[in-house]
Image (spheres, rainbow, N blue to C red):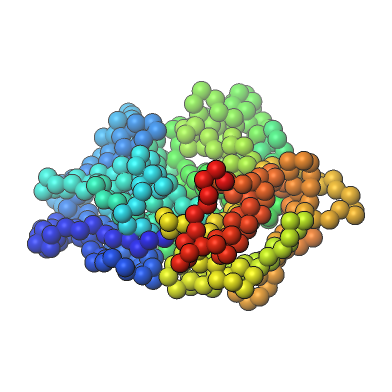
């Protein structure tokens, strides 16, 4: 990716802002020809001291809801927060939740610089999911735009309004921005930190889903995700992560007595959903839920106590299709984790070798990449790396579906095999066996994964669209680019 150029503002204005309101933009003095070595440097895009903030609002593109938190100081010095969003209800709002929201939205520091003079549409920033407006006590304001989440779900793309410099911020920004008035209602049923989670179990009776996974917490992003180990091995999706986050800080809208009549009335005699949270300190919550009833889910914790009533918006992700709860990709490794990939099959074989520093990409200046021993640093005129294209076709193979057993003959030979070597030269092998004319079963180290993928993941010819290729056509294009490219540049012929 190209190097990022931060907001350029006159230095005198910057000094005044720093002194008067405590806000700063770190200005990166990028120059033409700057190498990609700093394309992932940590940049403080924006910070405003909470004492200088009068309110923070977030406009939601899809729902047109405008969330707004106001901050005021009483004569005795006590800080008070109030909710004045467009979806405000006649309920009490949590002071701690509103404070946490404000102190998340006021700070966009240690962001990764992604691109300067970017095409904002590539990052979802031309029509951002969220527009964050920070109003200051001196009457001025700053506006930050939040676009798409990154492909691995660990961050989201952001920029300052009016700028084309793009940065990667933590997913805490995306999730906080996605909050609505319901998320600020007081009366917490559960109040636990996700970073203390050890594992989670999710059961849904209507389609016999039973998922178990271990938690992984990313300190740098204050973000928790999961690696499922039952009934198959795959990462969780951001939707599942958000569901568990909502449950960890679950607030309720009311309670009902746990009589036999009410247990039957609210669908809890045999609860259709169950989530079990296991924490590192040994604490366990077993939460049972009903289906959605008139905009609410009803439930109980550990099978005791009153029946709680929670807003449907907090728990509706329990209804999500299974493919929405798991990661999109059958397997995924960042290029800084990999030494090489050997791919073989009915179409031939090749070895893609990479040498990429931590936090960088194949496109970066000092990254090395070769295909069958030949230098594979070839791009199109727009700077799109064909080696990166091939890498993405290998490691971004979408799950097509789930099937309990793989019905293949014992004598079957894999159509395509992918052997991944990590930096310690340990190997993992993924084999693709024909399931039908349009699908393939996926095996990992000789064991069926439970997933199948569509033929296009291996064989689609994307033509001019370098983001729509399968493995083998991408390999053929990179081979041509190496052979026919001039000064490291190759263009796919029109009509390809």
Q: Nearer the viewer, residue 436 or 113?
A: 436
**Residue 260 as seen in the image, left or right of residue 118:** right
For residue 301, which quarter of the picture? top right
Identify the image quadrant of the N terminus.
bottom left
For residue 22, which quarter of the picture? bottom left
User: At 77% from the left edge and 56% from the top edge, which residue is drawn?
Assistant: 346
Extreme residue toward the bottom, this view: 424
Q: For residue 376, say whether it is visible.
A: yes
For residue 354, which quarter of the picture? bottom right
Q: Residue 55, image x and y in percent?
A: 22, 44
Q: Nearer the viewer, residue 372 or 17?
A: 372
The number of numbered discs placed on residues in the rendered structure image is: 0
Q: Please, is residue 200 above or below residue 339 in the view?
A: above
Q: Residue 48, image x and y in percent?
A: 22, 56
User: At 59% from the left edge and 44% from the top edge, which residue is drawn?
Assistant: 325
Q: Residue 85, image x and y in percent?
A: 29, 34
User: At 14% from the left edge and 50% from the top edge, which residue is drawn?
Assistant: 76
Q: Nearer the viewer, residue 82 or 107?
A: 107
User: At 76% from the left edge and 62% from the top edge, which residue is drawn?
Assistant: 445
**Residue 260 as seen in the image, left or right of residue 134:** right
Q: For residue 259, say whether it is visible.
A: no
Q: Please, is residue 236 above or below residue 320 in the view?
A: below
């Amino acid at each position: 990716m190209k190097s990022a150029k931060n907001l350029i503002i006159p230095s005198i204005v910057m000094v005044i802002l720093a002194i008067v309101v405590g806000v700063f933009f770190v200005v990166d003095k990028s120059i033409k020809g700057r190498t990609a070595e700093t394309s992932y440097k940590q940049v403080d895009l924006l910070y405003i001291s909470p004492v200088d903030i009068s309110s923070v609002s977030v406009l939601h593109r899809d729902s047109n809801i405008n969330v707004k938190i106001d901050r005021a100081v009483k004569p005795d010095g006590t800080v008070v927060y109030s909710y004045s969003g467009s979806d405000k209800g006649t309920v009490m709002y949590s002071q701690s939740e509103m404070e946490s929201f404000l102190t998340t939205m006021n700070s966009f520091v240690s962001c990764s610089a992604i691109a300067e003079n970017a095409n904002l549409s590539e990052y979802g920033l031309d029509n951002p999911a969220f527009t964050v407006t920070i109003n200051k006590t001196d009457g001025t304001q700053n506006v930050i735009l939040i676009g798409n989440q990154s492909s691995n779900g660990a961050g989201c793309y952001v920029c300052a309004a009016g700028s084309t410099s793009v940065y990667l911020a933590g997913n805490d920004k995306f999730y906080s921005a996605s909050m609505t008035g319901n998320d600020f209602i007081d009366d917490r049923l559960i109040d636990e930190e996700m970073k203390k989670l050890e594992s989670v179990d999710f059961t849904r009776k209507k389609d016999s889903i039973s998922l178990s996974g271990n938690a992984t917490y990313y300190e740098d992003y204050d973000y928790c995700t999961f690696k499922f180990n039952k009934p198959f091995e795959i990462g969780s999706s951001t939707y599942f992560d958000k569901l568990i986050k909502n449950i960890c800080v679950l607030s309720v809208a009311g309670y009902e007595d746990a009589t036999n009549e009410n247990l039957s009335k609210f669908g809890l005699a045999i609860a259709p959903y169950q989530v079990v949270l296991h924490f590192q300190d040994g604490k366990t919550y077993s939460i049972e839920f009903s289906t959605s009833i008139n905009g609410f889910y009803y439930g109980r914790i550990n099978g005791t106590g009153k029946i709680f009533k929670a807003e449907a918006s907090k728990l509706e992700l329990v209804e999500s299709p299974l493919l929405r709860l798991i990661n999109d990709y059958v397997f995924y490794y960042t290029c800084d984790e990999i030494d090489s990939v050997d791919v073989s099959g009915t179409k031939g074989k090749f070895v893609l070798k990479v040498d990429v520093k931590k936090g960088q990409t194949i496109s970066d200046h000092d990254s090395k990449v070769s295909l069958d021993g030949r230098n594979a640093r070839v791009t199109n005129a727009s700077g799109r790396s064909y080696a990166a294209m091939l890498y993405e076709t290998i490691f971004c193979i979408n799950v097509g579906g789930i099937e309990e057993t793989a019905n293949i003959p014992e004598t079957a030979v894999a159509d395509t095999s992918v052997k991944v070597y990590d930096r310690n030269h340990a190997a993992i092998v993924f084999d693709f066996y024909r399931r039908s004319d349009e699908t393939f079963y996926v095996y990992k180290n000789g064991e069926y994964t439970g997933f199948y993928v569509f033929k296009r993941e291996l064989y689609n010819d994307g033509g001019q669209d370098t983001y729509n290729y399968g493995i083998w056509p991408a390999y053929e294009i990179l081979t041509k680019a190496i052979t026919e490219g001039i000064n490291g540049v190759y263009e796919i012929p029109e009509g390809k």
